[in-house]
Image (spheres, rainbow, N blue to C red):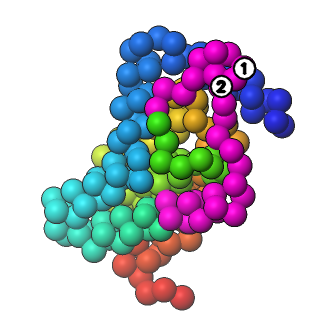
Amino acid sequence: MDDMDRRLLSALRDCGTDRRVAAVARALSWSGEHGALWLGAGLLGAAVDRERRGAWLRGTALTAAAHVASMGIKRVVRRPRPRPGAESGVGPLVRTAGRHSFPSSHAASAAAATVAFGALRPAGALLVPPLAAAMCVSRMVVGVHYPSDVAAGAALGAVAARLGAHWVAGGARR
């Protein structure tokens, strides 16, 4: 698994040598720092969609919770970030807030937002998944996460949002 992780990371990181791809990957990584894009989208949804304001706020809280959970897991697992420059001479394209990479917090918040917000509006179900997927891939293109970090983060976010789906929809917690 470790060898496949490194080979996939290397292939995706090589995509970042194209300056246009690198610029998009940097922008996605920056906008996803601490779940900012998804939290902002949830708050905007709450402001604009008065009919579903409570659901948007609960979905935003669930997205934040998935992000915080991933940060807690990072502190336990303590997997070091990839060092693509050590093997290829090409370093990461962005700075990171922390030293640990497993699971990807960007992927956790992106997947949680996909599940939570996608259920609220048809436009969300169409727009959020491709943007979330691009954000997940961007973390490998910029060279700061292994594919397994991203997969674990996405799984964590999706499971958290799915477990909280009843609450987001306005139902009582069981």
The image quadrant where one finds the C terminus is bottom right
> Tag on residue 133?
none
The residue pinned by badge 2 equals: 84
**Of the pair 46 and 86, the residue shown nearer to us:** 86
Amino acid type at circle 1 is Glu
* Circles 1 and 2 in contact, beta carbons < 8 Å: yes
**Of the pair 80 and 58, the residue shown nearer to us:** 80
Residue found 82% across the figure and 36% down from its top: 2
Cα distance in 3D space between marks 1 and 2: 6 Å
**Of the pair 133 and 165, the residue shown nearer to us:** 133
Q: Is mark 1 on a helix, strand or loop?
A: helix
Task: Name the image quarter holding residue 61.
Answer: bottom left
Span colored in magenta: 67-94
Indicate the position of residue 112 as horizontal and vertical percent values: 48, 57
Q: Is residue 44 above or below residue 86?
A: below
Residue found 59% across the figure and 17% down from its top: 90
Q: Is residue 79 left or right of residue 35?
A: right
Residue 134 in sight in this render: no
The residue pinned by badge 1 equals: 87
The image quadrant where one finds the N terminus is top right
Q: What element carries label 2?
A: helix
